[in-house]
């Protein structure tokens, strides 16, 4: 079974631009979560989508948004990029069976650099 | 609320040394507990998990026991190898908060020959 895939793997943007990152979950997984990882802040939760609805949200400004499609693929968008948005963005998928034993499986991440 | 606290790193060990990385948690419900590992330039990989009190998760020589009385899930390995050099994350999921995971800050481990 294929793992979680993220595209693109690397991205360079300039301040003020916007960016869209894509995540394809493991087949059959219905939940997709996004995280931002930086050396200073560590791993921070952005949001989680389940059945095309945002179910949980972290403490990030409204410039960060996401969506999920009917096939469970997800995208996240960052508008008006700032230098501090440079980070590794990780996507994780899970079955979301409703059981507490669900495991999140991570993709390799998208490395975003804002100049 | 839910939170995870990990021991600060970085940790440097010689090959074949014993490893312990401490992890304690706070949860409102009955969480499942996880250890993930991240190698340079990669995403996080599940290392092991435990879903109820007194469960022991194990994988690749690593072990962790879910201790409800001490709210801990310490990671141990009897003899580390250079290839174990990575960043280790402790995490919990609590059904009461849907599928949201809570991660510790990560502990960097370097094993020297």
Image (tube, helix red, strand yellow):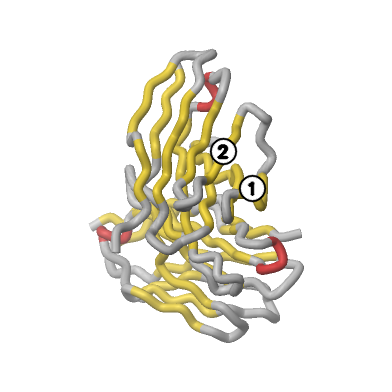
Q: What crowding class fits label 2: few (fewer than 14 Cα within 10 Å), some (14-19), or many (20 or more)?
A: many
Which residue is located at x 60 percent, y 32 percent?
A64
- Against A51, residue A11 (above or below) is above
Residue B104 is drawn in which quadrant? bottom right
Determine whether, in the image, residue A42 is placed left or right of residue B17: right
Which residue is located at x 39 percent, y 42 percent?
A109
Task: Please say if the residues under marks 2 and 1 sit with CB atoms less than 8 Å apart.
Answer: yes
Which residue is located at x 56 percent, y 38 percent?
A66
Front residue of A57 and B31: A57
Tell me the CA gap for discs 2 and 1: 8 Å
Q: Position of residue B34 (x, y in %)?
A: 51, 67
Determine whether, in the image, residue B71 is placed left or right of residue A29: right
Front residue of B94 and B60: B94
Q: Position of residue A111 (x, y in %)?
A: 39, 33
Q: Which numbered circle lies on residue A66?
A: 2
Q: Secondary structure at mark 2?
A: strand
Label 1 chain ID: A
Q: Which residue is mark 1?
A: A54
Looking at this view, name the residue that lies furthest to the front: A70
Q: Position of residue B41 (x, y in %)?
A: 33, 43
Which residue is located at x 34 percent, y 34 percent?
A8
């Amino acid at each position: 079974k294929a793992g979680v895939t993220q595209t693109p793997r690397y991205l360079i943007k300039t301040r003020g631009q916007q960016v869209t990152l894509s995540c394809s979950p493991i087949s059959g997984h219905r939940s997709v979560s996004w995280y931002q990882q930086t050396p200073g802040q560590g791993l921070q939760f952005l949001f989680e989508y389940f059945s095309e609805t945002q179910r949980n949200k972290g403490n990030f400004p409204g410039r960060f948004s996401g969506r999920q499609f009917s096939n469970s693929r997800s995208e996240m968008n960052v508008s008006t990029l700032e230098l501090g948005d440079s980070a590794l963005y990780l996507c994780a998928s899970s079955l979301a069976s409703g059981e507490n034993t669900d495991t999140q499986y991570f993709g390799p991440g998208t490395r975003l650099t804002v100049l | 609320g839910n939170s995870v606290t990990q021991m600060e790193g970085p940790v440097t060990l010689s090959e074949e040394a014993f490893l312990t990385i401490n992890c304690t948690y706070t949860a409102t419900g009955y969480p499942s507990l996880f250890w993930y590992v991240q190698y340079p330039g990669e995403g996080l990989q599940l290392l092991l998990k435990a879903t109820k009190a007194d469960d022991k998760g194990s994988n690749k020589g690593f072990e962790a026991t879910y201790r409800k009385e001490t709210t801990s899930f310490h990671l141990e390995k009897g003899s580390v190898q250079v290839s174990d050099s990575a960043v280790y994350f402790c995490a919990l999921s609590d059904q009461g908060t849907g599928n949201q995971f809570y991660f510790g800050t990560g502990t960097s481990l370097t094993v020297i020959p």
